[in-house]
């Protein structure tokens, strides 16, 4: 004998979306073990115990026979009464239903509601088989991409469906995601990766309908295979496109400024302008980050910052550039720099990125040069927390000219030797000196960066002067120290 389905679960099921509670208590756990259909309010509800007493043909709201049916149904132990139509009951009937504790429901199509309830209560295997078959057909016929398939599954299952990444964030489906789904609804999940890793496919399922839970569980398994296959195909396509972009950029960089007709044609096909004035950007990330997988996030940040740019995976990050048809005016370059800084700000909310921006240069040689400058600046930006790990070559002055020297085999040992007296001193004098020089010798700003009092910074700077025997007011000595600090901190 079936244990039945909770009345509240039936009311929450999509097949009963048009069924309305007209009167009586909201009994969440009342089990419905079956359906007893009667033609009208004059029928005798024999055998209604634990079942849904459903009036199929007519139930006039003002007819006293309706109240009599409610009393007989309650006496027989009916779980609830279902009436045709959703018109309100008379006040006396509502009061009676509340007094005897009998839920009274209304449905525009009572026959459809009866059949749906009977199916969910008694034909669980059929419910599972039907949903699995329709899910398989949907997975075959859905449009391109995982977003289209997730949307089609949600439409078929008539409940929220999500594609989640390994951390549980929504990739496709309604926000805010399953963690914040409506109370009373469970969430089924299926991992798409091997051994419980990778993306997940999830669906909300109301509690209390065993047949529906079993059906969505089985259908979720079928859909997960299809979604996983689509993700794998998308990944292969993304990696192929990334290799083509990287190979094309490598050809341009190593062309010496003279592109072959084939390279020029591929650049045009890719939508790249190789002539004109270029401003390069380099975005670096730690080696553990996959630039191919994270590229969509970079594209979103670039779009949000309204920066018109090409984005290409390059080593442990991305080479990015904007092309102007004319020599950009200072105001244009300023807007471009502001947009690039916004991209960096957006990315650093979730990624530990460092960004460098090159100067404007013309033609193919100019593209290569500005990307090289941006790469140098990005490496320098890695250690510049005070600037938000953002460095613009135009604002580096003499430091840019000396940057190449800082990467030679002789510079780092010399820098370490110069700063060696600071080793082992209390207060991390190397970090203090670096922050002080980054802050253009401002004690107040240095104190704010380090989170210490201004007087503490002043005392440390005095101690640094004594240990290094340097004149921090001398521009040349200050520049040499700054480059040495940057190099040593970067290689810590």
Image (tube, helix red, strand yellow):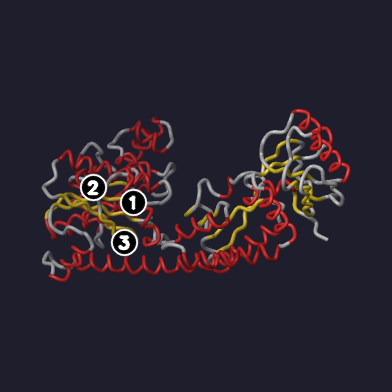
- Please give the label number shown on residue 372: none
Where is residue 240 drawn, in percent x and y?
Answer: 34, 69
| Mark found first going from the N terminus, 2 or 1 | 1
Q: Nearer the viewer, residue 377 or 246?
A: 246
Q: Which residue is mark 2?
A: 480
- Rendering coords of residue 23 (x, y %): 74, 35
Find disc 3 in the rendering and name its residue. Answer: 313
On residue 354, which mark appears? Answer: 1
Q: Residues within 10 Å of mark 2 (few under 14, many from 20)?
A: some
Please name which of the two marks, 2 or 1, marks the residue nearer to the observer.
Answer: 1
Asked which secondary structure carries label 2, the reply is helix
Left or right position of 225 against 352: right
Can residue 467 be seen in the rendering of this structure?
Answer: no
Residue 257 image-quadrant placement? bottom left
Foreground of the two, 367 or 418: 367
> Does the image show residue 193?
yes
């Amino acid at each position: 004998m079936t244990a039945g389905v909770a009345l509240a679960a039936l009311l929450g099921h999509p097949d009963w979306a048009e069924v309305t509670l007209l009167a009586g208590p909201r009994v969440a756990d009342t089990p419905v073990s079956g359906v007893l259909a009667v033609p009208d309010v004059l029928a005798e509800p024999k055998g209604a115990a634990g079942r849904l007493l459903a009036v199929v043909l007519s139930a006039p709201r003002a007819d006293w026979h309706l109240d009599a049916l409610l009393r007989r149904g309650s006496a027989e132990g009916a779980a609830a009464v279902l009436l045709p139509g959703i018109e309100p009951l008379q006040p006396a009937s509502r009061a009676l239903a509340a007094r005897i504790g009998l839920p009274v429901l209304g449905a525009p199509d009572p026959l459809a509601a009866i059949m749906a309830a009977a199916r969910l209560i008694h034909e669980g295997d059929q419910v599972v088989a039907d949903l699995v078959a329709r899910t398989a057909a949907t997975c075959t016929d859905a449009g391109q991409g995982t977003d289209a398939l997730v949307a089609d599954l949600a439409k078929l299952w008539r409940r929220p469906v999500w594609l989640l990444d390994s951390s549980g964030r929504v990739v496709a489906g309604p926000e805010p995601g399953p963690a914040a789904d409506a109370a009373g609804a469970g969430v089924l999940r299926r991992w798409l990766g091997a051994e419980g890793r990778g993306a997940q496919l999830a669906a909300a399922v109301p509690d209390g309908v065993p047949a529906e839970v079993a059906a969505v569980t089985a259908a979720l398994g079928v859909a997960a295979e299809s979604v996983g296959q689509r993700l794998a195909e998308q990944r292969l396509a993304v990696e192929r496109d990334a290799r083509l972009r990287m190979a094309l950029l490598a050809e341009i960089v190593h062309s010496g400024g003279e592109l072959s007709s084939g390279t020029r044609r591929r650049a045009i096909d890719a939508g790249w302008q190789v002539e004109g004035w270029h401003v390069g950007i380099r975005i670096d990330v730690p080696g553990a980050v996959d630039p191919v997988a994270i590229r969509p996030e970079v594209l979103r940040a670039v779009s949000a910052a309204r920066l018109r740019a090409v984005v290409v995976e390059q080593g442990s990050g991305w080479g990015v550039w904007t092309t102007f048809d004319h020599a950009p005016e200072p105001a244009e370059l300023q807007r471009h720099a502001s947009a690039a800084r916004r991209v960096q700000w957006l990315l650093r909310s979730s990624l530990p990125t460092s960004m460098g921006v090159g100067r404007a240069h013309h033609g193919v040689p100019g593209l290569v040069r500005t990307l090289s400058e941006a790469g140098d600046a990005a490496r320098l930006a890695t250690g510049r927390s005070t600037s938000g790990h953002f460095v613009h070559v135009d604002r580096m002055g003499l430091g840019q000219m000396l940057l190449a020297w800082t990467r030679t085999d002789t510079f780092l040992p010399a820098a370490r030797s110069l700063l060696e007296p600071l080793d082992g001193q209390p207060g991390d004098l190397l970090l203090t000196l670096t922050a002080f020089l980054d802050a253009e010798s401002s004690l107040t700003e240095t104190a704010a960066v380090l989170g210490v009092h201004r007087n503490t910074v002043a005392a440390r700077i005095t101690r640094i002067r004594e240990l290094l025997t340097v004149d921090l007011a001398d521009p040349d000595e200050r520049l040499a120290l700054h480059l040495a600090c940057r190099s040593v901190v970067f290689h810590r």
